[in-house]
Amino acid sequence: MWYIKQGLLRRIAPVLVVCMGLTMGYPTQAIIHGLTFPGMTISTVKLSIQHAHFLQSVEKWEYYDSICSAAIVGLKPLTLITAAHCMKEVRLTGPKDLPVVGIAQPELLGLEDVRLTQAFYRPFDRVAEDLTQDVAVLVFDAKVQSLIQPLRIRIDDHVPDVIMICGYGRGYGEADTRHPRCGERKPVHDLSDFYQILPKPYRDMDEMLHLQAQTQFAYTQELVHAEKALLAVNRLNDLDQYDHTIPMPTVGDSGGPWLVLNAQGQYELLAITSLVERFYNPSANWPFFQKQVPLSEYPYVAYGLKLSHPEVLGFLQYAQHSGADIQFTSAPLNHYGKRPANPGR
C-alpha cells in the first residue's frame, strides 16, 4: 500500500535537512526573498496539515499544525503533488485513515467544497532512507470555479538553463503572504564537484570547516543517486560568492513546484522541493556569516526531486491508474526553460 497507516513517528518540521551526516528536521523559515506570484497563475496551493505525536512519557497525544506547498496537476478530480515528508506524523481520520490535510484559503484559487478522497504516499522512515520516495499525491472532490491550468509533468531528462522555484515559505523578518513566492535559479549541473557548492576560496579561508561540509555533502549523494533523481540549486551569485539574499526554498516550501516553460508559454512541472542542505558552524573566516541573520537563513543547496525519475514515475503512474488526474509531457521547451516577463507581484 502506498499510503501511511500510522502517525506514530518522531515530530519533524516539514522540510528535510541534512546536517552533519544525519537526515532530520529543522525549524527554518522561506522561498526566501522571492517575488510574490498569484497562486492561480502558477497552479500552486498552500496545504494545511494536522499532525499527531504520542508522548510516551505521559501517554498522551500532542497535536500540532504545519504548512507545505503543492502543485495542481489535475482537475478531474482535483489532484495535487507534494512532498511525502510533509505527511510525517500526519493525523488520520475516517474509515479510510485519510490524512487531515486541507487547502488553505481555497477561495483564492476558485475552489469550493474541497474534500480529500484519496492519498498516496510512503511512510516517513522509507522517505528518510531514500529520497526517491519523497512524493505524495492527494486527490480531492472539489468544485473548480476558476480557469486554473493544471501542470503537466515533464518526463524528459533535459535540464533547462533556468528553473522557477515556488512555495509558501517566508524568510526571517519577511511578512506572511496569501500567495506563493517564486525565484528563478540556475541548476547545478555537476553534483560531483563540491566546489560548485562551496568554491575553493572558502576552503582556503577555513579548510577544516570546508572539509566537514564536503563530508556532509558526500553523505547526501549516498542517500540517493543524486545525478539521476535530484536537481540542485546553490546560493552562489555570479561572482561565485555565497549570498544569503538569493532566493532559496526552506520550510513551508516543501512540495512546491520547480517549473519550466514549454514552447507554448505554459508552465510544466519538472520537480518538487524535497531537501534543503545546510552546513552549520558559523565561521568568522567566512565573511557571509552575519550575527544578526539566523542560521536558518543559510541553506547552501536545495534539492528538487525529479518527477521523471523511474521510481517516482512508477509511483505517479500507480496513482494515475488509481484515479488521480495526472498528465505527462515531453513537448519542446521555450528557450531551454526560460520564462517570459513576471506575471505578477
Image (cartoon, helix red, strand yellow):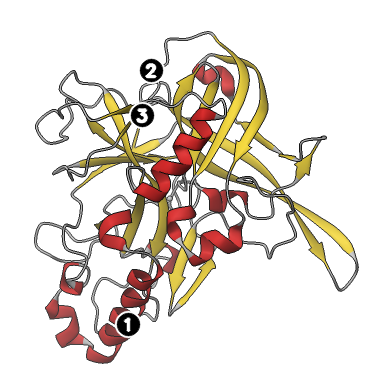
Q: What residue type is labelled 2?
A: Gln
Name the element at disc 1: helix
| Mark 1 crowdedness (10 Å alpha carbons): few <14, some 14-19, many ≥20 | some
* Residue at 24 percent of width and 84 percent of height: 285
Q: Which amino acid does label 1 sit on?
A: Thr
Label 3's element? loop
Residue appearing at x 61%, y 16% in the figure: 142
Task: Give the residue at mark 3.
Answer: 37
Q: Earlier in the sequence, mark 1 or mark 3?
A: 3
Horizontally, residue 85 falls left or right of residue 273, namely: right
Residue 60: give x, y in percent of width and height: 89, 61
Q: Distance between the residues labelled 1 and 3?
A: 37 Å
Q: Which amino acid type corresponds to the residue marked 3 in the rendered image?
A: Phe
- Label 3: few (<14), some or many (≥20) within 10 Å? many
In the rendered view, would you say 19 is above or below 183?
A: below
Residue 345 point in image, percent of width and height: 32, 27
Residue drawn at x 15%, y 34% is 338
Residue at 51%, 29% (x, y): give it: 321
Q: Which mark is residue 215?
A: 1
Quarter occupied by residue 149: top left
Let me know if residue 285 appears in the view: yes
Which label sits in the foreground, 1 or 3?
1
Label 2 sits on residue: 149
